[in-house]
Image (spheres, helix red, strand yellow):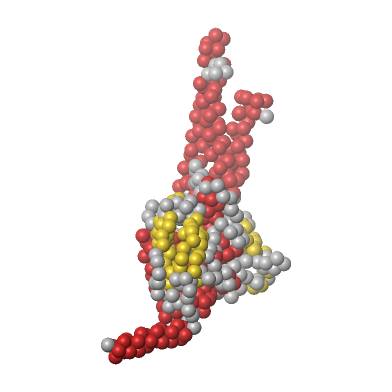
Amino acid sequence: MKLRLYIGGLVAFSVLFSSCGKDSEKGESFEPHTYNVSGKVEKGPFVSGSTITIQPMDSKLQVRGDFYSSTIQDDMGNFSFGSKLFEAPYAELTANGYFFNEVEGELSSGTLSLRALVDLSDKTTVNVNVLTHLKYQRVQKLVEGGMSFKEANTQAQKELFTAFGLQKYEDKDASSLSIIGGTDESAALIAISSLLIVDRSEAALTEYLAKLCKEFGDNGAFTESTRQQMEEDRNALAGQLSAVRNHVIDRYEEIGLPIEVKELAYFFDWDNDGVAGNETLQEGQTVTLETTELQVPNQGGNYTIKITSPVPVYLEPLISEDDESYPPLISDDYFSTNIYEGLADASVSLEKSLENNVLTINVSPLNSRTSKEASVKVYDCMGNEVGEVKIVQEGNPDMPLPKLGETGKTVVAGFALELAKAFSQWSLMEQYYHYNKEANLVSQYISPDATIISDIWNSFYRANRMNLMFKEAEAKQLGVYQSYFDVWNALYYYYMVVAWGMYLM
């Protein structure tokens, strides 16, 4: 009996000694502690009724102790667990629910899960968002490799923000960021959040996030194919950034919290140099073009212009807002296509390229008797015009006068027909005055509200409108028929003044 007690005591002592050794090796020992954990869950904000759980974890991020659950309290994503006893200060938070889609400007039709890892001994206010979710597996991987939680979290934070070119914000832990803060970090969070969901359903977003978490967890960076995908998504999102910003502002105003959101375009790495927000001019900086005007002979020519710029410049804006304007009732092409027979476009034709801040312009020969103008504009990545080269190309007065093409003939025939109708009605009206001997017969057919008078007016008006539109279009091309249009104008204006007199003045 004594022998068994002795052996049992040795075993117990051995286990205790071994356990103490492990704690000593870790350099950490934990005492149960009460924490009051609260925060926000934001994609856009998770809506009221969404669920959130928290699990205490040890220094190796193994689950330890009780499991607590709660619900999102309001449509701003707020949650609170109240005072709870934790056996260890590290914790995993997992939120699941519907959220506000800031790109579409509406509530999601499906749910999304987001996670975060946190050291509650440092802070008990924890925000769960796409950034905390993206670095979750990376922190786990680094801790498994022997790092402390603090070391792993610091490295994962740095790697994640660097992956998006936002390394200047790496000192602000992702779990402290909120889209309602009105700060640069808040805008950065919205920018990344919108980048991940653009053109994706909730199911596709869940799949995409899983892929990103795996890549980043393994390597602390994204693969080349993923970076290319993000670049495509960024370009697809470019024209919607103002709308995304307004959607976020409007959503919070709708639920009773006015917020400020900074311009989102400054939080993307548009030129892929690894740093976001360095692509626009700062105060006092300018873009200088070696020349801003080219006088080009009729036969054209090749030109190179050096550009001095502290930021990358482009020939087309990388960011262009969606065009919500309605198309014109009559297309500009209607009066400018096939005006002439067998003659190419009479506007300045050029090719342009920009490489290593050298602008190359190749101007083709001009098919015009008169000089024409064009311009080449230079933009920063935000779509701001930072320079312009004006081009004036000489015409060739010796060019033969071209015949009208199919469109030209159709338009001329159209307003000529309207004039013919007007003069036909005019002649009929004159007959009533000159050939009817009985005055009452004239008054029977001719009165201020007689149909024949309104018909004459309408025909003259339609002819006038078509003639002036064609005159303007032809002036932009060769401008060789302008005097003919002037004769037509003079003709029907004369008769309209004769008929209506001072009412046209």
Which residue is drawn at the image coordinates 57% and 64% (left, top)?
185
- Residue under the image location 60 percent in, 37 percent down: 489
Q: Position of residue 160 (x, y in %)?
A: 50, 73
- Where residue 129 appears, as percent x and y from the top left, is 48, 63
The image quadrant that residue 53 belongs to is bottom left
Residue 452: x %, y % from top left: 51, 22
Residue 467 in view: yes
- Along the viewing direction, whichever of 312 and 195 lies nearer the viewer: 195
Whether residue 403 can be seen here: no
Q: Residue at x 52, y 77 (%)?
A: 150
Could you tell me which residue is drawn at 50 percent across and 75 percent down? 153
Check the image and name the residue furthest to the front.
2
From the image, which quarter does the N terminus lie in? Answer: bottom left
* Front position in the image: 170 or 326: 170
The quarter of the picture where the C terminus appears is top right
Front in this rendered view, residue 262 or 299:
262
